[in-house]
Structure formats: C-alpha cells, structure tokens
C-alpha cells in the first residue's frame, strides 16, 4: 500500500508514518509512505505551496492522509472544510482515497475534542472520506489511564506514546486489522503500555469502521 501523509508536526513528530510502516511490517505487509509536512502548517498553506499536490501526482498513492492545523477545526471549521474540499478532487483524480486525520485536543482544553470530532466527521460525511479517529482514541485513553502520558510538555504535541496511539489507529484504518499484539515502539515503551494503547485504538477504530 502507498500512502501520502500531508500535515504538520502532529504527523511528523516521532515519525507517525514510519511507526505505521513498522506495524505493517510486523504483520507481513508493506507500507510505502511519503510525508509532506511543515511546522504549524494548515492544509491551505500546503495547497497554496503546491508541493502536496505535486507529490500526489508523482507518487500515485492508494491513500492520502490530510491533517489540518490542530486548532482550526475549533476556531474556524468552515475554513477547515473549505481546505479539505480543495484537496479531495485532486486526491480522487490520482485514484486515491482521502483519509482525514482527526486530531486531539490540547491538554488544557479537553472540552475542545467534541468540536474537533464534529468538524472532521461532518466533512467526512459530505465528501465520503475515511476518518482516522485518533483524537477520539486519545480521549478514550485519557479517560481511563494516567500513564503513559500522551501529551508532550507543551500540552499540544504528542509524546512517543501519543504518536504510537495515532499509528495504531492508522494501522487499523489502513489495513483493517486489530493492532493488539503488535510490538512496542522501541525499548522506551513497555509491553504493558503498548498493549493498553493498542486496545484503546482498536476499541475506537473498530466501531468507526
């Protein structure tokens, strides 16, 4: 499977595409991936620059993951929807399917998750996009676990555990399999923490499929 990821540091931090590829490899599958990312970038910034569309046309991927700037779904969902509407026809023109990276709320504003989730799911219904409900999985995990910590010290970006949870969601969305039993992300993550994260991802993503 070939997947192009378009986003910013929420995708690039801890190499989420690489984590997903490692998970696929552990199950005997192969994920060819590419990333177009810039710190803090919105989808409109990527659209205006043109590199993301050029990468799509060059790569001809099976899936294109769109990750919007993290606070835009709360501050201006209409603008977010406009940005996604720009990309979807281009994605479909190269024979790919769009996947929306539903992100998480800041640590200090967990109540924002409902607005983020609503913004992504509304435009997904309109345009028949696949949703990777990462933020919903984060919300579920944070509701029942204190450890491992998902937010980095800035309260916004992911720790390795947070990125691993995102990768587990993407693995299920892309390959249709449970992530339970996959290897942990290196020696820094215990098998117990990895299993708790995998189960949270599967519980949410299984219902979303």
Image (spheres, rainbow, N blue to C red):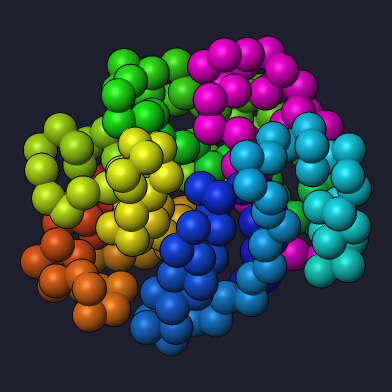
Query: Residue 113 at x, y = what percent?
Result: 37, 23
> Which quarter of the figure has residue 190?
bottom left
* 119 within the magenta span: no
Query: Residue 111 at x, y = what percent?
Result: 31, 16
Query: Residue 30 at x, y = what percent?
Result: 55, 81
Q: Decide if residue 136 is in sight here.
A: no
Report the front residue among 17 and 70.
70
Quadrant where the image shows the C terminus: top left
Left or right: 14, with 108 as reference point: right
* 85 within the magenta span: yes
Left or right: 157, with 11 as reference point: left
**Residue depicted at x 76% and y 28%:** 83
> Which quarter of the figure has residue 181?
bottom left
**Residue depicted at x 74% and y 64%:** 61
Query: Residue 158 at x, y = what percent?
Result: 38, 49
Quadrant where the image shows the N terminus: bottom right
> Which quarter of the figure has residue 55?
bottom right
Left or right: 118, with 162 as reference point: right
Left or right: 56, with 33 as reference point: right
**Residue depicted at x 49% and y 81%:** 29
Q: Residue furthest front?
A: 153
* Span highlighted in magenta in the image: 60-87
Report the front residue among 96 and 53.
53
Q: Decide if residue 188 is in sight here.
A: yes
Above or below residue 170? Residue 27 is: below
**Residue depicted at x 69% and y 35%:** 42
**Count of numbered labels shown in the rendering:** 0
């Amino acid at each position: 499977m070939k997947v192009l990821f378009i986003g910013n540091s929420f995708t690039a931090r801890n190499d989420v595409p690489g984590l997903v590829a490692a998970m696929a490899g552990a199950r005997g599958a192969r994920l060819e991936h590419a990333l177009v990312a810039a710190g803090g970038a919105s989808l409109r910034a990527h659209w205006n620059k043109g590199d993301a569309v050029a990468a799509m046309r060059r790569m001809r991927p099976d899936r294109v993951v769109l990750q919007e700037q993290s606070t835009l779904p709360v501050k201006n969902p209409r603008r977010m929807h406009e940005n996604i509407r720009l990309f979807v026809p281009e994605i479909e023109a190269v024979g790919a399917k769009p996947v929306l990276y539903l992100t998480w709320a800041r640590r200090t504003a967990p109540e924002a998750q409902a607005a983020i989730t609503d913004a992504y799911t509304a435009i997904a219904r309109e345009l028949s996009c696949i949703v990777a409900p990462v933020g919903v999985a984060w919300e579920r995990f944070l509701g029942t676990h204190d450890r491992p910590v998902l937010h980095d010290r800035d309260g916004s970006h992911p720790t390795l555990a947070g990125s691993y949870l995102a990768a587990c969601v993407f693995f299920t969305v892309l390959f249709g399999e449970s992530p339970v039993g996959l290897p942990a992300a290196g020696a820094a993550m215990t098998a117990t923490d990895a299993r708790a994260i995998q189960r949270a991802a599967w519980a949410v993503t299984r219902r979303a499929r």
